[in-house]
């Protein structure tokens, strides 16, 4: 009854059948809230204390509920193994600090989740780790920045914050030498599987689409047994271990992940098309639109355009501010991948302290809006955006 390992199964089917550990006859995932486990003998305890990935010794090492989630992700990504963390950043920091040492060099994409970027800019230098940033959309840029014998990690994110740039997974997978890793949070295991392109590690903020209901803070990394075992050795010392409660919510979320992503992607395409036709919205970025700079690449490596959109509201800072305050169906909140359509205005919130030229360097305009498309009816979402654009642009014209 547990995990099928038939590679011919569709992700929709895997998502329903995966993540069942042990001999439990419970159809729903089983919650093991315990922090520790009783050992029947000293020999048994010694074996648990010295085996990699033990999930019945002490919950910082591993936990059966968390194991179920890890198995589900490994199966969906076509990986040998996975390790869960207490957040997406727990996963990112474990990969970076668990694999790199003083004197090492990292090639990282310029277009990144802000906290990941800060880790590379502010933390890595403190540990003597050099980082070179490249434009991930420029063909060959990652490979050209690799210093043989010195570069230990190549870090990419696709589709990327904030403007949904798409990175060529085949190109990344072809890089030999350093460990290649892709933050696939915006893709989820449903839209793309970076490991199938030869990438070494895939990671997610499972807080987002994977858990999918804004009720878990969770991260995960998947890859070869060897790399995951190595990361496990760092993770038990790092201590950013996943909560069994969050893992339970995420395994439940995975059951509906394929169907949620399909519906959210369909609504996102309809909304992006409506925005592109609207005078008050400019620079609409959606990988599923023919106007996206890497539309052909996206069509090749993603099963749909995804669940996120970025666009600019006319009227700059004031236009953007008015837009996020005028939406009624969509909600103004940071995060993504849940059932509710969310809008954020980076220039007045997360990136408020940046100068216009610094915003531009991050690909953010004063009126840039990021949209996480939810599960409401597409017509209601489009009507809501249309009325909010009218409010934002009328105010802009009067100002
Ligand atoms: C949210 C996010 C993260 C960080 O995940 P947390 O769960 O918030 O720690 C990393 N990468 C991407 C692309 C994200 O969206």
Image: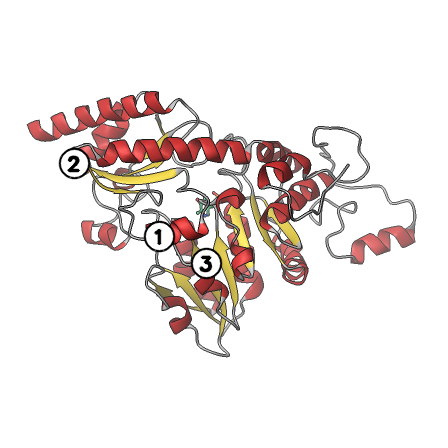
Residue at disc 2, secondary structure:
loop
Q: Residue at x 66, y 55 (%)?
A: 80
Marks 2/1 in contact by CB < 8 Å: the verdict is: no
Residue at disc 1, secondary structure:
helix
Name the spot of residue 2 as percent of width and height, x first. 75, 39
Q: Which residue is mark 1?
A: 296
Q: Which residue is mark 2?
A: 314
Q: What label does residue 169 carry, if any?
A: 3
Give the quadrant of residue 254: top right
Residue at disc 3, secondary structure:
helix
Q: What label does residue 231 carry, if any?
A: none
Going from N to C along the chain, the mark reached first, 1 or 3, is 3
Give the quadrant of residue 283: top left
Q: Residue extending furthest bottom?
A: 149
Ligand 1: does it lie within 8 Å of the C-beta at label 1? no
Q: Specify the quadrant that holds the N terminus.
A: top right
């Amino acid at each position: 009854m547990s995990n099928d390992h038939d590679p011919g199964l569709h992700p929709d089917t895997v998502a329903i059948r995966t993540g069942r550990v042990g001999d439990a006859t419970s159809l729903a995932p089983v919650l093991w809230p315990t922090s520790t486990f009783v050992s029947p003998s000293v020999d048994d305890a010694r074996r648990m204390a010295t085996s990699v990935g033990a999930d019945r010794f002490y919950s910082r090492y591993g936990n059966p509920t968390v194991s179920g989630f890890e198995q589900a992700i490994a199966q969906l990504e076509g990986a040998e193994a996975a390790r869960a963390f207490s957040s997406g950043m727990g996963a990112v920091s474990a990969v970076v600090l668990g694999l790199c040492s003083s004197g090492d060099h990292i090639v990282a994409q310029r277009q990144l989740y802000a906290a990941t970027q800060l880790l590379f800019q502010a933390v890595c230098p403190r540990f003597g780790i050099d980082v070179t940033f490249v434009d991930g959309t420029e063909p060959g840029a990652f490979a050209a920045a690799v210093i043989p014998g010195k570069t230990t990690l190549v870090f990419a994110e696709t589709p990327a914050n904030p403007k949904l740039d798409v990175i060529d997974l085949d190109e990344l997978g072809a890089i030999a030498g350093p460990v290649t890793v892709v933050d696939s949070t915006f893709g989820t295991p449903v839209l793309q599987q970076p490991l199938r392109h030869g990438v070494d590690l895939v990671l997610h903020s499972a807080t987002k689409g994977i858990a999918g209901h804004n009720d878990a803070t969770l991260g995960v990394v998947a890859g070869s047994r060897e790399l995951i075992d190595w990361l496990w050795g760092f993770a038990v010392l790092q201590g950013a271990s996943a909560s069994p409660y969050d893992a339970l919510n995420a395994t439940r979320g995975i059951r509906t992940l394929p169907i949620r992503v399909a519906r959210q992607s369909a609504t996102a395409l309809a909304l992006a098309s409506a925005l592109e036709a609207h005078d008050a919205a400019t620079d609409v970025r959606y990988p599923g639109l023919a106007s996206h700079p890497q539309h052909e690449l996206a069509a090749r490596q993603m099963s749909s355009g995804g669940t996120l959109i970025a666009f600019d509201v006319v009227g700059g800072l004031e236009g953007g501010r008015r837009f996020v305050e005028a939406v009624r169906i969509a909600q103004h909140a940071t995060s993504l991948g849940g059932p509710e359509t969310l809008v954020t205005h980076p220039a007045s919130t997360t990136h408020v302290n940046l100068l216009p030229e610094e915003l531009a360097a991050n690909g953010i305009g004063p009126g840039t809006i990021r949209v996480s498309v939810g599960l409401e009816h597409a017509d209601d979402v489009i009507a809501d955006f249309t009325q909010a654009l009218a409010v934002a642009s009328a105010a802009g014209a009067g100002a």
